[in-house]
């Protein structure tokens, strides 16, 4: 589907986040409606940081 690993990971995290967020909004009281979105962005950017750091190390080794 996506050749770019970052885009693929974004979709893999976005779909469950949308489902969980919808459930929280529907059944929750409204105080926690942004919790799923905050968790999504936090997990994605932590993963992205480590992925890019690993990618840079691999590029230095091959040079």
Image (cartoon, rainbow, N blue to C red):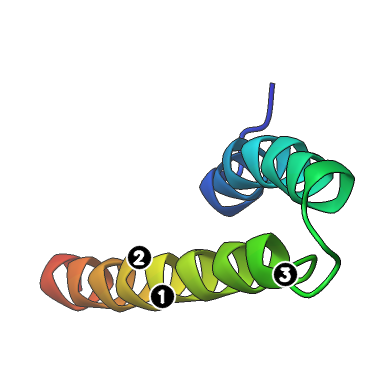
Comparing labels 1 and 3, the label whose residue is closer to the camera? 3
- Classify mark 3: helix, strand or loop: loop
Above/below status of 6 relative to 62:
above
> Residue 51: where, in percent of width, then height?
35, 65
Instruction: Looking at the image, tell me whether mark 2 or mark 1 is earlier in sequence order.
Output: 1
Circle 3 residue: 32
Q: Is residue 53 left or right of residue 33?
A: left
Circle 1 residue: 46
Q: Residue at x 30, y 78 (%)?
A: 53
Disc 3/disc 2 C-alpha distance (Å): 29 Å
Circle 2 residue: 51
Disc 1: CA contacts within 10 A as few (<14), some (14-19) or many (>=20): few
Q: Residue at x 67, y 47 (%)?
A: 17
| Outermost top residue | 1
Comparing labels 2 and 1, the label whose residue is closer to the camera? 1
Q: Residue at x 59, y 45 (%)?
A: 13
The image quadrant where one finds the N terminus is top right
Disc 2/disc 1 C-alpha distance (Å): 9 Å
Above/below status of 54 relative to 60:
above
Q: Residue at x 20, y 66 (%)?
A: 58
Viewer-side residue, 58 vs 41: 41
Instruction: Looking at the image, tell me whether mark 1 or mark 3 is earlier in sequence order.
Output: 3
Comparing labels 3 and 2, the label whose residue is closer to the camera? 3
| Outermost left residue | 61
């Amino acid at each position: 589907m996506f050749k770019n690993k970052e885009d693929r990971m974004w979709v893999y995290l976005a779909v469950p986040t949308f489902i969980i967020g919808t459930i929280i909004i529907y059944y929750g009281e409204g105080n926690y409606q942004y919790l799923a979105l905050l968790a999504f962005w936090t997990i994605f950017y932590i993963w992205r940081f480590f992925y890019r750091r690993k990618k840079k190390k691999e590029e230095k080794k091959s040079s």
